[in-house]
Image (cartoon, rainbow, N blue to C red):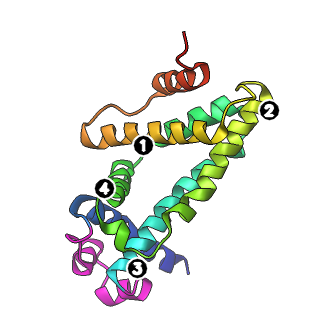
Amino acid sequence: MKNNENTKEKIIGVAIECFGELGYDGTSMRLIAEKTGVSKPAIYYYFPDKEKLFVGVVEFVVRKFQSQLDNINNSNKNALEKLEAILLSRFQPTRNRATIRRFMNSIFTSGVKMNMHFDHRKMFESQQKIIQDIIQQGIDEGIFSADIDVKVFMYGLIGTMNLFSRDHIFDDAPPINKKLADQILKQFVDGVRK
């Protein structure tokens, strides 16, 4: 069973790389077989076609980020520390991080997502719920004002993360570090009012 999971993860890892660099149309099952050293029939055992492989990769990446969010949310940190950890987690310099970001960006900047059979909204609802819960925690802790609109705060924070991700991917901008994460959160918490 573990060998099956290792093979599946190997296929997914190479697929992330290929889809991220070559796009959906530029990636073939043959190419993935060559790069993984896994036979095409074995790849088809796990993923019956390229579309199912692409969807499997998206689900894998979303689950990975969901797991990070769960760990952050279940920590003993206060709300501000949790939001900082979320910002920093998007830019951790781990292996395949840039490749995963390129892959995710390719989903949202190409027409591929319109043709796939998965619900983007449903995939991200649980992630949004965690961020909303953390913001509510901040209200309960007295860190955030009780009259803030949690949904607007969440959308603003996610939008900010996505824009920094875009800059990081396309413009080789430096990743968010602790100082910048603190500055972003301070801007959200303190606002821009004079």
Image: magenta residue range? 24-48
The spot of residue 76 in percent (x, y) is: 75, 37
Q: Residue at x 38, y 76 (%)?
A: 53
Q: Mark 2: give few (<14), some (14-19) or many (20+) Cα within 10 Å.
A: few
State the residue position of label 1.
Answer: 162
Q: Determine whether the residue tagged by mark 4 lies in a helix, strand or loop.
A: helix
Q: Is residue 45 magenta?
A: yes
Which residue in the protein does label 4 denote?
109
Q: Are marks 2 and 4 in contact (CB under 8 Å)?
A: no
Could you tell me residue 4's position as x and y percent?
Answer: 49, 80
Camera-near label (4 vs 3) is 4
Q: Which residue is mark 2?
A: 140
Residue 40 in sight: yes
Which residue is under mark 3?
A: 52
Q: Answer with mark 1 or mark 3, whichever residue precedes in sequence.
A: 3
Residues 10 and 132: in front is 132
Could you classify mark 1 by the number of other residues whose Cα lies within 10 Å: few (under 14), some (14-19), or many (20 or more)? some
Amino acid identity at mark 1? Asn
Q: Mark 2 belongs to which amino acid? A: Asp
